[in-house]
Image (tube, rainbow, N blue to C red):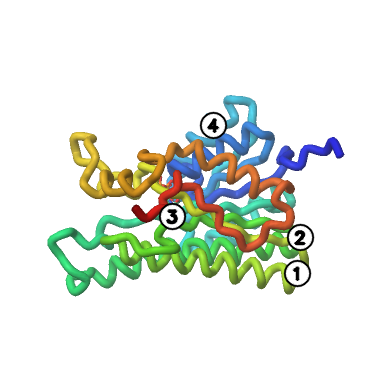
């Protein structure tokens, strides 16, 4: 007794989509708790800006540039991380999101779907989680220990109107999470776990145009989300941090294949 099971100091945590709205909150918070953060994203400028901000508060972060769909680049990132830190303790797959082109407008039907955009959103959200998992989980297996946290969604459980491709992909992310929870533990032992967080509704870049009118007022869809949320509000990005900390830390050592819902009650509520 006396050990702090939530201690995460020194852990090497790689966050894809690390300078996105949810990813950057996780990066700053986990760094403030003593973790060493690797921010992975497509823009060097945005990644360096966030790493600089974290370092200027006396914490540890580096930025690596990569598209999560580019396996060759991910392999190169892996080499760079292993050279610097010798291991990857935690992978948080936070790159993803809906794409405006894959959204079915209210005056259109499923028969108007842009199949290429549908494929793109499935690719990003599903393969954008699968490919980093394949690359970085191998480093974890080589090190004998690993912890992966995926970002699922409300649409993993029940489809939301208009965003069919996103929902299909996030349902697959939830399934992949559970698959990998079994796969890694069965083949490599109980030092490996894979879980997901399913955030409810948070206003970020990937859903801003669906939730806010150009003048900043709520769209009908945003009003419908709030009416369907017992808390009667959107989430704030920092309200995910306790769940992320829990899954990163040894406090959740026996938690494997779980999908932690953080949604103000949206998923539990009917009328
Ligand atoms: N905002 C919400 O309400 C909500 C709800 C449920 C799930 N999520 C999920 O949370 C995760 C984070 O999203 P967010 O809300 O912070 O949105 P965001 O748009 O702020 O962040 C997403 C990040 O992913 C990056 N990204 C996109 N494509 C990429 C690629 N090919 N390679 C590398 N990086 C790429 C973006 O540049 C961005 O930095 C996503 O998986 C999203 O689907 C968000």
The reply to whether callout 2 and callout 3 are in contact (CB within 8 Å) is no
SS at mark 4?
helix
- The residue beneath circle 2 is 191
The reply to whether callout 2 and callout 1 are in contact (CB within 8 Å) is yes
Which numbered disc, 4 or 1, marks the residue closer to the eye? 1
- Measure how far apart labels 2 and 3 are at the Cα level: 31 Å
User: How many C-alpha atoms fall within 10 Å of the one at disc 4: few (<14), some, or many (≥20)?
Assistant: some
x then y, percent, for residue 253 = 73, 53
Residue positioned 50% across, 44% down in the render: 23
Residue 185 in which image quadrant: bottom right
x then y, percent, for residue 248 = 66, 48
In the figure, 161 relative to 50: above or below? below
User: How many C-alpha atoms fall within 10 Å of the one at disc 2: few (<14), some, or many (≥20)?
Assistant: some
Query: Disc 4 or 1, which lies upstream in sequence?
Result: 4
Q: Which mark is residue 267?
A: 3
- The residue beneath circle 1 is 188
Query: Disc 2 or 4, which lies upstream in sequence?
Result: 4
Give the camera-side residue of 158 and 150: 158
Which numbered disc, 2 or 3, marks the residue closer to the eye? 3
């Amino acid at each position: 007794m006396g050990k702090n099971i939530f201690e995460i100091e020194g852990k090497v945590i790689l966050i894809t989509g690390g300078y996105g709205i949810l990813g950057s909150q996780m990066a700053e918070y986990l760094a403030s708790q003593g973790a060493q953060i690797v921010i992975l994203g497509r823009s060097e400028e945005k990644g360096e800006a966030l790493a600089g901000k974290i370092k200027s508060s006396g914490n540890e972060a580096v930025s690596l540039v990569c598209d999560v769909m580019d396996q060759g680049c991910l392999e190169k990132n892996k080499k760079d991380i292993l050279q610097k830190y010798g291991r990857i303790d935690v992978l948080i797959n936070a790159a993803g999101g809906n794409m405006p082109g894959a959204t079915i407008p209210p005056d259109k039907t499923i028969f108007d779907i842009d199949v290429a955009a549908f494929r793109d959103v499935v690719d990003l959200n599903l393969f954008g989680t699968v490919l980093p998992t394949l690359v970085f989980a191998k480093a974890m297996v080589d090190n004998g220990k690993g912890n992966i946290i995926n970002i699922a969604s409300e649409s993993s459980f029940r489809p939301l109107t208009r965003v069919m491709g996103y929902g299909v992909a996030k349902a697959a992310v939830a399934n992949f999470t559970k698959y990998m929870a079994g796969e890694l533990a069965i083949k490599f032992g109980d030092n490996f776990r894979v879980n997901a967080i399913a955030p409810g509704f948070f206003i970020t870049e990937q859903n801003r145009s669906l939730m806010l009118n150009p003048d900043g007022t709520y769209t009908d869809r945003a009003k419908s989300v709030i009416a369907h949320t017992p808390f009667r509000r959107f989430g704030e990005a920092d309200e995910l941090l306790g769940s992320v900390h829990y899954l990163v830390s040894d406090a959740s050592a026996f938690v494997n294949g779980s999908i932690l819902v953080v949604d103000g009650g949206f998923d539990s509520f009917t009328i």
